[in-house]
Image (tube, rainbow, N blue to C red):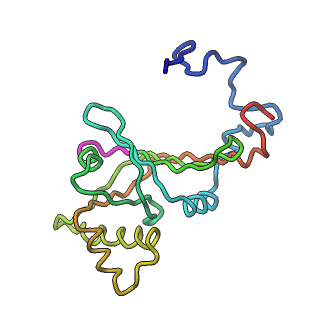
Amino acid sequence: MPTIHGPEGCLTGARHGKVTGRDEGDPVGESRRDRIRMNKEELAAFIADQKSLQVACHDRDGAIHLSTLWFAMAEDRFAFGTYTKSQKIVNLKRDDRITVLLEDGTKYDQLRGAMVRGRAVLHAEDGAGGADEVRRVARAVMRRYEPDIPEEHFEGAVELWAAKRTVVIVEPEKVITWDHTKLGGAGPYGY
């Protein structure tokens, strides 16, 4: 498949008109960006409905390493576990920059998402107190995704989950959200 490049590397070709961040009909002083931003309550509800977290970190050569993981919220921070020997953990030990993404919607006027850029804080069973955090996140992830585990087997399942995993807590530096349902059905071309 050929790569399509327009002027200045733009993938969609030339842009027409002035790009101001405001559309005709936008209230004065309010950009489209401001209109679609989620507030804290909307963001919390959106996160609660999502199941798959996109996680991006940097490989040694600078390329993006992208994967999808189950997650839980730990004191308003994204938390997930992955195998300690995984490429994600190798990368995050070397470079703690991380970006996570949740998104949904299949049409423009339904698109919603949240992207968080930040730093990864790693917790492992390393004798430095990380074991408690690993188990705390294991419990939260398992309650979220495996609610049918019988209570008498739950702690055993937590131990199996935690055995070879490192937990990552995302310390946010920048949060970007969007909810196109706030646009009142307008598509990308104004109709």
Q: Quadrant of residue 13?
A: top right
Which residue is outermost to the front? Answer: 1
User: Residue 159 at x, y = what percent?
Assistant: 27, 74
Q: Residue furthest bottom?
A: 152
Could you say where residue 49 lies in the image, as x and y percent from the top left? 57, 62
- The single residue placed furthest to the right in the displayed view is 25
Q: Residue at x 81, y 35 (%)?
A: 191
- For image coordinates 40% across by 83% down, the residue present is 150
Which of the two residues, 71 or 1, is positioned nearer the viewer here? 1
Magenta span has 144? no
As rendered, which of 174 and 137 lies closer to the eye?
137
The reply, left or right, for residue 7 in relation to residue 164 is right
Q: Please state the horizontal and vertical placement of residue 40, each as a whole percent of the image.
A: 60, 59
Q: Which residues, given as a range, are shown in magenta?
A: 94-98
Height in image: 65 above or below 104?
above
Q: Is residue 95 left or right of residue 74?
A: left
